[in-house]
Structures are given as C-alpha cells and as structure tokens.
Amino acid sequence: MEIDHHSSHIPKWKAKEIEEIKELIRSYHLFGIVGIEGIPAKQLQKMRRELQGTAYIKVARNTLIRRALEELGQDVKDMAEFIDVQTALVFSDQNPFKLFKLLEKSKTPSPIKAGAVAPKDIVVEARPTSFPPGPILGDLQKAGIPAAIDGGKVVVKETKTVLKEGEKAPQLLASMLNRLEIYPMVVGLDLRAVLEEGSIFRPDVLAVDETQYFNDIALAAKQAFNLSVYAAYPTADNITALIAKASTESRNLGIYAAVFEPELMGALMGKAQSQMLAVAAAASTKNEDAVDDELKQALGAAAAAAVSTTTETKGEEAVEAKEEKEEESSEEDGMAGLGALFG
C-alpha cells in the first residue's frame, strides 16, 4: 500500500484529487499536458464530449497536478515543467501522433476579444454584407474598415489589413469583426507535451507533415533502387532491371565495336546506312552532283522520316504526361494508407 506522508497536511478533497490524477496516469497508455487558456467553459464541455471514448480530459489546479507528478516520481515528474497558466491533463490509449492530430482537429475558429493579441495579420476582404444602411456603417468606418453603401446594402469597399500580428484588438474593431463573422482566433486544447513509456514528445515532433513524409519515403526508395542498380548489387526487387541493363550495355558494346553477331547485324546495317547517308548529305551540301539520283531520293526519304519521328515524339510526350498524372493520382491514394499511422 502506498503511504502519502503529506496527506495529513492538506484538505481531504485535495488529497482525493491528487490520488485521482495519479490513478488516471497509471490507468492510461499515455497522458499529456494541455493548455486550456481562453476556452469558454461551454466549448470545453463540447470538446470533452467529442473526445469521449478516445481521450479523457481532466481539469485540476496546477498545484495539485504538480503534487501528483512529484509523488509518482521517475519520468512522470519531468512533465511538471509544462504546467503553466490554465492547464489540464489529457489521457488516452492512442499513440502520441494520433492524439496530437485529434486535438488539432478539435480546434475551432473563434472571435477575437477586445484586448486580445492578434495571432496573425487580420484582413477584411472587399465584399458585400447583409447589413442595411444604419449606425453600423459609421461603426465599421470608425473601426478602420472601409465601408460604404451600395445597392441599398453596406459593403466593404476594399481589402484591408485592420490589425497586424502581435497588436491588441480595440473593443470596437473586435465587435465589428464579430458582426462580420470574421473569426481570427483558433481555440482548442493546446497540447504542450505527451509522456509515453518514459519518453516525452513535444508538438514540434508530433506535428508530422504526412505529404512530405510520404514524399521522403518514396524518394528514399527510388534512390536506394537506383544505387543498387548502379552498383550492380542484385536483389529480388532489382534483378530484372539489372539483367535488362546488362543486356542493353552488351548490345551497345557489340554495335560500337562492330561485332558481327546474328542478333546485331540488323543494328549494324542500320548504323552503316545512317553513316553513309550522313556522308552523302555532307557531300551533297557542297556539291549536288556528288551524289546520284538514288542517293538523293534516299536523303529525301530520310528527311521526311525525321519530320514524322518528331511528330510522333510529341504525341508520345503527351501520352507520357497523362501517365505521369495518373501515377501522381495513384501516389495520392497511397497517402490514405500512410495517414492511418497518424490518425
């Protein structure tokens, strides 16, 4: 039985709260510390309901959370450094990446309050509104929003940045942004750290860009395959490519060295024909009488064939572009499978 030597120095309800926190930490696969500053009680209750069955949120005083972590000791007490301002605990049997993604998805846009600091530049786009002419026109203009009357309705005449990142929102501007249904704040459970099996994960580690992750894996696989083929390192995956490469290289060597083998004779004759036509074309350029009529016909046929080949090549390039598009679509489908790793 665990003996709490400090329990006699604190009220029973606090001791009970501490024991409940400790029991929750023992019961779940992982737990995290989240910031709940600025979240209205009603919205917090809604988040709790949405997370039910996946994660459990426990709100408690910072002093009691610290006391529980200290009493558990070991790696758990290191989580105390993430306790700050308004704090809550989140418990789950999910992995840390899925939990982080889940909490990020639960965040919702929220109006900015008077005196709140803008998290980014707040821009009001030029657009019509549903407001009829009235006092709101003057209020919008006083708040720095370029408003006017057009067609019997209030409109925002031009796009304007009304508040810079880091600036505090004046009361009138905050009210007008709310009236325009512009919600620049993002409210939700701000995960500060998660403890899983003795390891602490912070948001900078948990915020995985799944698209970039997939692209990195695909690039690494492609580079590994190319390296193995270049180094002639045979594996079950590259043996076909290695044999094809060896066959092509041996054939090219035979043609270059003019090795008279039955399989190469067609290519050798074609090479000789091309070289002969090149010499004839060069001679004809200097003196038309240097080649006979038969050669002139052959040169004309070769020129026509070159034009035809160019046209066919353009058609093939269009087909290849279409196939590449289809491959990209297939890769995007593969992302769905990768996404399962992160929720």
Image (cartoon, rainbow, N blue to C red):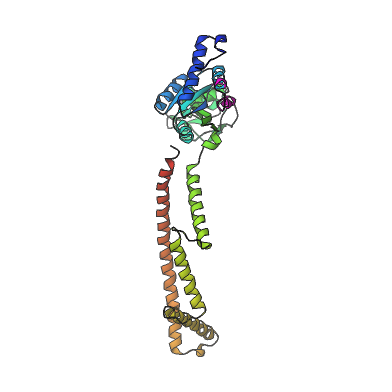
Q: Which residue does the image show at 45% across and 60% down from the upper left?
A: 238
Please state the extent of the stretch shown in magenta in the rendering.
Answer: 70-86
Residue 48 rendering spot, x and y as whole percentages = 43, 24
Visible in this render: residue 230? yes
Residue 268 rendering spot, x and y as whole percentages = 46, 80
Q: Which residue does the image show at 40% across and 24% down from the upper left?
A: 49
Residue 179 versus residue 92: which sits nearer the camera? 92
* Mark count: 0
Which image quadrant is residue 54 in?
A: top left
Residue 321 versus residue 127: which sits nearer the camera? 321
Does residue 232 sit above or below 188 in this rendering? below
Indicate whether residue 153 is drawn in magenta.
Answer: no
Residue 182 versus residue 150: which sits nearer the camera? 182
Residue 95 rendering spot, x and y as whole percentages = 46, 34
Does residue 308 sit above or below 156 in this rendering? below
Quarter holding the C terminus is top left
Does residue 288 sit above or below 168 in this rendering? below
Residue 73 rendering spot, x and y as whole percentages = 57, 23
Visible in this render: residue 169? no
Indicate whether residue 77 is drawn in magenta.
Answer: yes
Residue 21 versus residue 170: which sits nearer the camera? 21
